[in-house]
Image: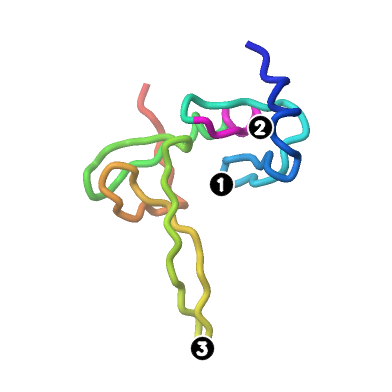
């Protein structure tokens, strides 16, 4: 199914990629998931290949199912807000730098 109508329906300022590593405006190669989020086609492929494992409930999920929560990080005298990767099932924070490989 063609998604070209999304270029007209959604203004360029609101066509932002949902992949947490990208977050750039979508000018071409648009894709949409069943939950309504829009992606660059390549970013959607990368997100589906990226797998994480929760240390709380031991469930595994890919980059499209990831949930982000805003948390305060204290560095010396300043406090900054950062987005942290959380499990979509139980809400436990997942180490962002440790994606695991799916066993084939």
Mark sitting on residue 40? 2
Q: Circle 2: is it few (<14), some (14-19), or many (20+) Cα within 10 Å? A: many
- Which numbered disc, 2 or 1, marks the residue that appears first in the sequence? 1
The residue at the point 52 percent across, 30 percent down is: 36
Q: Which residue is mark 3?
A: 77
Instruction: Establish if 93 lies above or below 73.
Output: above
Along the line of sight, the residue nearer the viewer: 58 or 80: 80
Specify the quadrant that holds the C terminus: top left
Along the line of sight, the residue nearer the viewer: 57 or 90: 90
Pick out the residue farthest to the bottom: 77
Instruction: Establish if 103 lies above or below 73.
Output: above
Q: Which residues are magenta?
A: 36-45
Residue 67: image location, x then y, percent = 41, 46
Q: CA distance from mark 1 to mark 3?
A: 28 Å
Residue 94: image location, x then y, percent = 36, 52
Pick out the residue farthest to the left: 57
Q: Secondary structure at mark 2?
A: strand
The residue at the point 77 percent across, 34 percent down is: 27
Q: Which residue is mark 1?
A: 20
**Left or right relative to 55: residue 51:** right
Q: Secondary structure at mark 3?
A: loop
Q: Secondary structure at mark 1?
A: loop
On whether residue 40 falls in the magenta region, the answer is yes
Specify the quadrant that holds the N terminus: top right
Residue 71: image location, x then y, percent = 43, 66
């Amino acid at each position: 199914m063609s998604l070209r109508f999304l270029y007209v329906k959604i203004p360029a300022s609101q066509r932002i990629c949902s992949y947490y590593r990208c977050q750039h405006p979508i000018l071409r190669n648009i894709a949409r998931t069943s939950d309504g989020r829009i992606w660059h086609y390549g970013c959607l492929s990368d997100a589906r290949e990226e797998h994480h494992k929760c240390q709380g409930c031991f469930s595994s999920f890919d980059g499209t199912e990831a949930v982000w929560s805003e948390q305060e990080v204290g560095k010396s005298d300043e406090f900054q807000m950062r987005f942290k990767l959380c499990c979509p099932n139980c809400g436990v924070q997942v180490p962002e730098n440790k994606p695991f490989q799916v066993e084939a």
